[in-house]
């Protein structure tokens, strides 16, 4: 009798322990998979820029999706993947993990929705919003002489144009009623002479950058330089 009691207790304890051990495994199996949505905009940024290139109107944007379950990438080659861009269905296909599109005008955000169909008996979706910006031109100021009152140099740096490199830009500088213009390579630097100018004089400098590919892509920067 005592032996049967001990055996029953052993079976009961073993069953409880097995259930406790299996609970995390069941929870892990039932956990929702993790979406990974990455995107890349093909607008220009300087090589030294460590941030992300942002799209302007008509920039090519490429979005890719991956799914992680139990710490591993899921093979999506046999799953139907549906892409919706700015509320419009664009592509659907088996294993279609990547899609490209041009950023639409009049949108502060480009909206992307991806749905993986028939995954574990259901559909799972994820949503992404990509900010749309305008082209920019930055003016960097630096002294080119140990005496900053002798001469200063201004440098133009473009961001987010739909160009492969700055050689596709023209620049126009305006300073004190005078203008200087030319292709980017020869006009990116502007030397500001200070001889004969009273120290502390405030001068406004305007710079306009225009794309040779699309004349509607322009950026203007206005600064006030204290001589």
Image: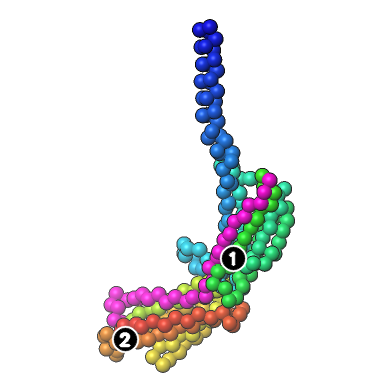
Q: Is mark 1 on a helix, strand or loop?
A: strand
* Residue at (29% x, 74% y) in the render: 146
Residue 45 on image: x %, y %: 51, 68
Asked whether the beta carbons under mark 1 and mark 2 sit within 8 Å of each other, the answer is no
Q: In which quadrant of the rendered image does the C terminus lie?
A: bottom left
Q: Is tag 1's residue or tag 2's residue first in the polypeptide sequence?
A: 1
Instruction: Judge by depth and name the residue closer to the eye, 181 or 135.
Output: 135
- Picture quadrant where residue 31 is located: top right
Q: Which of marks 1 and 2 is in front?
A: 1
Residue 218, compared with residue 53, is above or below; it is below
Which residue occupies the extreme front position in the image? 1
Where residue 187 appears, as percent x and y from the top left, is: 48, 81
Residue behind mark 1: 111
| Residue 11 seen from this side | yes
Q: In this view, does 215 lie to the left or right of 146?
A: right
Residue 106 placed where, x, y %?
58, 76
Residue 202: give its label: 2
The CA span between labels 1 and 2 is: 44 Å
Range drawn in magenta: 121-150
């Amino acid at each position: 009798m005592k032996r049967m009691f001990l055996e029953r207790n052993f079976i009961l304890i073993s069953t409880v322990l097995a259930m406790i051990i299996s609970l995390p495994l069941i929870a892990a199996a039932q956990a929702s998979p993790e979406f990974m949505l990455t995107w890349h905009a093909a607008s220009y940024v300087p090589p030294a820029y460590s941030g992300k290139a942002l799209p302007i109107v008509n920039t090519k944007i490429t979005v890719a999706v991956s799914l992680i379950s139990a710490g591993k990438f899921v093979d999506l080659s046999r799953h139907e993947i549906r892409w919706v861009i700015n509320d419009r269905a664009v592509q659907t296909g088996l294993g279609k993990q990547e899609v490209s599109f041009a950023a639409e005008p009049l949108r502060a955000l480009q909206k992307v929705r991806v749905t993986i169909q028939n995954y574990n008996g259901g559909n799972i979706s994820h949503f992404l919003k990509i900010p749309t910006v305008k082209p920019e031109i930055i003016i960097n100021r630096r002294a080119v002489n140990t005496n900053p009152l002798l001469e200063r140099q201004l440098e133009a740096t473009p961001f987010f144009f739909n160009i492969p490199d700055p050689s596709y830009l023209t620049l126009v500088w305006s300073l004190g009623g005078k203008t200087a213009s030319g292709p980017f390579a020869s006009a990116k630097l502007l030397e500001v002479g200070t001889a004969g100018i009273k120290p502390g004089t405030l001068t406004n400098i305007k710079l306009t950058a225009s794309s040779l590919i699309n004349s509607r892509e322009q950026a203007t920067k206005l600064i006030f330089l204290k001589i």
